[in-house]
Amino acid sequence: MIRLSFVQTGLLLSVCLLILNPSHAQDQPDTTQKDLIDYTFQILKLKAARDPDQSSRKVRFSFAPASSPAQQRVTLISAINLAFYRGDPAITNLSTVYFYPYTNFAGRYSFSVLSNIWSAENRFNLTSDFKISHNTYNDYGLGSGSSIDSVSVLEYNHTRLHLQVSRLVFGYFYAGIGYYYDQYFNVSQTSLDVLTTDFEDYPYGTTSTTATSGLTVNLLRNSRKNSINPDGGFYTSISYRMFFPWLGSTYTWNALYADVRKYFRVPTKKRSILATRALYWDTWGEVPYLDMPATFTDVESRVGRGYRYARFRGRGMLYGEAEYRFTLSRNQFWGGVVFVNAQSLRETPSGKFTYVNPAAGFGLRVKFNKRSEANLTFDFAFGKDSFNYYINIGEFF
């Protein structure tokens, strides 16, 4: 695998955007889509034709071997996506499964599987998150006002199993229940620049082992047909989570997670989408340190482009993001995005949302699989005293 420096990658993206200047947006669009699989067949001169049947139940496969600094330190990541229908595509949403195996070849590793499965005619929705990992990352303490100079290193092993099942009630509305289990063990901290850290002062979940086990009650409204690359629609997910010792949890606490997304089709001749998102995530009770809301620790681990993993952490999070997605080429092979976001975490001990940390960026899109609408995504984001790039499969939200 070829690794590019920040400068080289930025120059490459800039050249691509210049070559594919969207000033031709008024041209008559070509309705024939092309993806990376088509061009691979063409370059290798393969004669086998792809199945033209869009309604086929075959699994659509996409992957992106990549290197990303968002998780800190050079890490090899392979994002793998499987997409398929469990029923008639005309009345059934696209189901997806993501695999994220990664390692830095220096003791750090993770294997996670995220699934979003729709039954025939969307009668049921099943989501799951399974993870086994050994993490080491910089911790900057609590609140959005934490200093980049007050850094320590947290290390731990993590096992996760999250399951939610929802049933169609009427229209696009669903209700359901779920079970969440997280265990952190071999937890340790190394202080680099401060005598006493927020982790050391915090009373819950800072020992060697902590277990979180509880039930969830879920409400969902989803009118998106394709969660990999939404072409319109509305999404709202509200989850109330309850953790008790009688279920195996070390502490008693609760959480509320509310995620709202809306996708607007912009009236242009080429495909243009304005995607917006608002997230409110709050906690009460004896909340373990590693279970508190933090950057990139949301359900899909995609909140906070512009900052590193867990750069900001607190008992509650407010987050907003807007992204404009546009097609660059008539065959929809090339595309681009520009985006802005902002996050605020509750301060300790006041519990107030005092500081806001904004970020902005841009990205390039390459159509990997037109059957599932899966794009290879290359994003560059700038935050306060921060810069990061991200390579993945599928849109961030």
Image (cartoon, grey):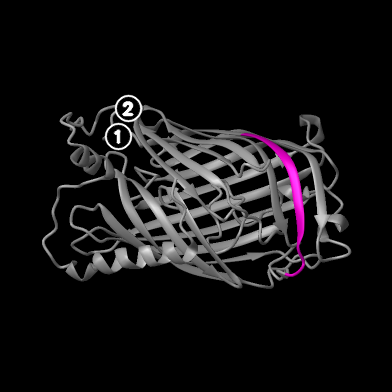
Amino acid, disc 1: Ile
| 195 and 129: which is toward the camera | 195
Q: Please give the range of residues in magenta.
A: 149-161
In the image: residue 353, left or right of residue 237: right
Residue 21 position (above or below residue 296): below
Count up the numbered dots: 2
Q: Which residue is mark 1?
A: 91
Q: Real-space Cα distance between discs 1 and 2?
A: 8 Å
Instruction: Work out which quarter of the rendered image holds the N terminus and state it.
Output: top left
Q: Which residue is mark 2?
A: 87
Q: Does the magenta segment cover residue 360?
A: no
Measuring from the top left, give residue 388's x and y in whole percent. 53, 62
Question: Which residue in the rendered view is the most extreme toward the left?
Answer: 28
Measuring from the top left, give residue 128's x and y in whole percent. 55, 34
Q: Secondary structure at mark 1?
A: loop
The answer to whether mark 1 and mark 2 are in CB contact below 8 A is yes
Label 1: few (<14), some or many (≥20) within 10 Å? few
Residue 173 position (above or below residue 52): below
